[in-house]
Amino acid sequence: MAVYHYSAVNRAGEVRTGRIEAASQALAVESLARDSLMPLQLREANAGIDLRTLLPWGGASVRGASRDDVVLMTQQLASLTRAGLTLDRALGIALQLAESPPQRRLLEDLMTRVRRGSSFTEALDAHRASFPAYYISMVQAGEAGGALPNILERLSGLLVRSQETRQKVVSALIYPAILLSMIGFTLILILSFVLPRFQSLFAEAGSKLPLPTRVVMALGDAVQNYGVVLAAILVVAGLLVRRAWRSPDTRARLDGWMLRRRWLGAVIRKAESARFARTLGTLVGGGMPVPTSLRIASGSLYNRVLQQASAQVLRGVTEGQGFAEQLGRSGQFPALLIQMARVGEETGHLHQGLLEAADMLDADTQRAIERGLVVLVPLLTVLMGALVAALIGSVLVGILSVNDLAG
């Protein structure tokens, strides 16, 4: 029997927290339901720490609440509104359950805006740093059609699947990131602290030292004497790259360049297409017209080239042409997505075809990343060893040459 911590709401809308023993999470949910409690949070008491949450990129958005906070908030609001609670009351309950300060501030502001008469869409629009464009557009469509609980439920499923895929990718990249950090740390350590100890030994030899030794000693002097300047240059370069990344023209050219790279382009295309297909399938499955769904789903694409391609598809569909046909004409989307969309159109189950295509593209993306890491990790290991060996070898060659000169 496992022990679970839970937060649940009763029929009166009051929040209850506690512990429950059950053989599985599903049985824990059933037990709470028998007590007229709707679970909002349920996690195993002895669950370990997720190392991804300790990383700076392990779930945080650029500003505001983290992606995990948004997923949890959406799940809670979907459950509460589906149970018949008003939106402002659901926001109040979610606020009571919020754990992180950014999440509490976000929910408090959303609740305040809604109670002052703003629509939920308008309240979300004030926090675009935390909510993607397609999220706000879907909520707007749900409010306009009087189906906000259903839209929140679909958004919850969409965000959970996207977050699961993202976490798998992050987990796969942790080890290469550690290797790269070790390479940088090792190089700085050798150049800053190890090489200076040999300066007095090599000072007398001067220009008679072997070329590799002179190059390495020059690098050590540069790091030692101009380390702060080099760090400042790197910071400025990073800011310039960030500014260029925000430029639409530069971003479009860079996105196009990445798509043209063989392995990187394939991974980006599949990952973007999976998110696009899942969003579109979710909307179409909810009864939204294909053109409207396309307009919203385009907001889930980050690559500018694919955004332009989706706009081209939207124009064709608006003119009455087939969706799958337009996907093929764009020349930017994977053949798998095109074929599944064509089958879905022919059978009258477009949303199912899109969701199945999204699952397959997600799996393909993960496999491609894993195959790439199979090559990358050994290469990084060899690179780290080669760099350290080259530095140490150049020092040893210098020492031997000094001994020869002394002899």
Image (cartoon, helix red, strand yellow):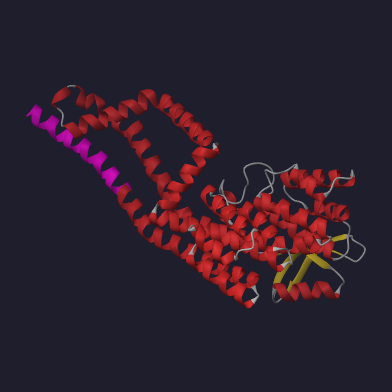
Q: Is residue 392 magenta?
A: yes
Residue 188 visible (yes or no):
yes
Q: Position of residue 14 (x, y in %)?
A: 89, 60
Query: For the point 79% across and 58% down, which residue is it?
Result: 142
Quadrant where the N terminus sits is bottom right
Q: Position of residue 170 (x, y in %)?
A: 52, 55
Kindly give the residue lying farthest to the right in the view shown: 12
Q: Is residue 381 magenta?
A: no
95 over 186 or under it: above or below: below
Q: Horizontal placement of 122 versus 62: left or right?
A: right
Q: Nearer the viewer, residue 228 or 73?
A: 73
Q: Tell me where residue 79 sits by quadrant.
A: bottom right
Q: Tell me where residue 215 sits by quadrant.
A: top left
Residue range (magenta): 384-407
Query: For the point 15% across and 32% down, which residue is it?
Result: 210
Query: For the point 9% across and 31% down, which residue is it?
Result: 404
Query: For the point 22% across and 35% down, which residue is it?
Result: 395
236 over 165 or under it: above or below: above
Q: Position of residue 104 (x, y in %)?
A: 77, 46
